[in-house]
Amino acid sequence: MSDHSQFSLKLSLLNDYQFLVDFGDMGQLQTDEPAPLGSGDGPNPSRLLGAAIANCLAASLLFAIRKFKEDPGTLTVDVSGEMERQNGRLRISSVKVNLHLGNESTAIPHIQRALAQFEDFCVVTQSVRQGIPIAVEVFDSKGQQLNLTSAE
């Protein structure tokens, strides 16, 4: 049984601002800063943070729906981040995540219960949210925005 209370990975400088992120048995990923620092040959840390938030929320929403043995359909996620200068340095000031279910909400009888709790399952979002506002919206396959009842 694996211990999920710790994680480790290794970064190695490849060139300029390009790093190879080694996740061990889970593979590798090349990162890079956009121009003018780097050449944009991979995602930068800000995009990785956005991906981590979005991926964690998506997995949490799937878990919350599937624990009721219901089908969310194919889930897609859009994430965007805002950057602003704080004390003269560029910082991520907010993140917005839109989750799009592949099925209509009426086909998911326990959707409101799932929506009320799924954010609490997300380790990444709840950790990052302590310092960066994260707005979350969920839409069904008809584009109807569903009400969330969790606290930020």
Image: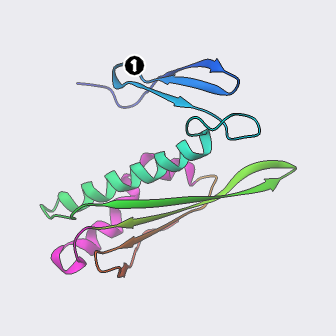
Q: Which residue is mark 1?
A: 24
Image coords of residue 14 (percent x, y): 61, 18
Q: Residue at x 44, y 53 (%)?
A: 54
Please, which residue is most extreme toward the right here?
88
Q: Is residue 23 magenta?
A: no
Image coords of residue 60 (percent x, y): 33, 54
Q: Residue at x 59, y 24 (%)?
A: 19
Q: Residue at x 31, y 59 (%)?
A: 61
Q: 119 or 86, which lies in front?
A: 86
Q: Residues within 10 Å of mark 1 (few under 14, many from 20)?
A: few
Q: Residue at x 55, y 36 (%)?
A: 42
Q: Judge from the rendering whether residue 51 lies leftward or rightward of residue 74; answer left or right.
A: right
Q: Judge from the rendering whether residue 70 lies leftward or rightward of residue 112; answer left or right.
A: left
**Image quarter of the N terminus:** top left
Q: Amino acid under label 1?
A: Gly
Please, which residue is most extreme toward the left here?
69
Q: 76 or 95, which lies in front?
A: 76
Range drawn in magenta: 102-129
Q: Is residue 120 magenta?
A: yes
Q: Judge from the rendering whether residue 35 lies leftward or rightward of residue 55; answer left or right.
A: right
Is residue 88 depicted above or below 150 in this figure? above
Instruction: State how the image is colored.
Output: rainbow
Image coords of residue 117 (percent x, y): 34, 63
